[in-house]
Image (cartoon, rainbow, N blue to C red):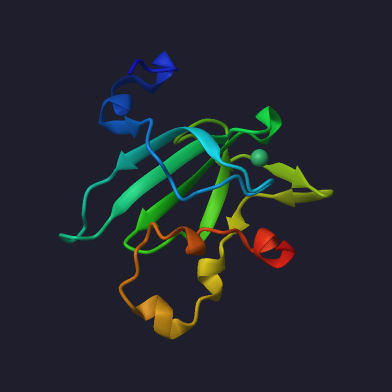
Amino acid sequence: MSSPDAGFGDAIQRDRTNVRTPMRCPLCGGELTQVYIRDLGGITAGITWQLHAGRCATHDEHGWFQAEVVGKPPREIFPVARPFGQTKRLVVDGREVYSFATVWNDAPTAVQMQRVDPLDPQYWTVRRHAYNL
Ligand SMILES: [Zn+2]
């Protein structure tokens, strides 16, 4: 697969593309396209440490999002200017948003202490959508 952006340089070489992520668009809940997963290596053997990035497949204006997985589901999903780029500001319902908290924050402590699958989609839901279900 060729790089969609030559500016990524060498970094793109260790990124996986055309992969699936549990992350969905925090704005519309839709699937992401152009998904990248960057493996950052294990701190400890068996720990999943990855950066996930993808673009809203439904609405171009929603743009790119990314989240970091370090052995646990992510606590936040960030809007970014491009995959693995800087966090950008979004305005949602008139409020500035720099990140979207996931329902993993709301999991009981007992669950958070357990060994859960960090890629389990139920924990990647953003709070706003959880309450709108
Ligand atoms: Zn969207």
Location of residue 131 by image quarter? bottom right
Q: Total of numbered circles in the picture?
A: 0
Vertical order, 130 against 6 (above or below): below
Relative side of 88 to 112, left or right: right
Relative side of 55 to 118, left or right: right
Location of residue 70 by image quarter? bottom left
Outermost residue toward the right? 94
Quadrant of ligand 1 in image = top right
Q: Residue at x 50, y 68 (%)?
A: 104
Q: Is residue 65 visible?
A: yes
Q: Is residue 86 visible?
A: no
Percent of width and height locating residue 108: 49, 82
Outermost residue toward the bottom? 110
Percent of width and height locating residue 51: 38, 45
Relative side of 70 to 52, left or right: left
Q: Residue at x 18, y 61 (%)?
A: 44
Vertical order, 103 against 111 (above or below): above
Vertical order, 85 against 103 (above or below): above
Percent of width and height locating residue 76: 53, 57
Q: Residue at x 62, y 43 (%)?
A: 30
Q: Quadrant of the C terminus?
A: bottom right
Q: Quadrant of the N terminus?
A: top left
| Residue toward you, 83 or 30 | 30
Relative side of 126 to 94, left or right: left
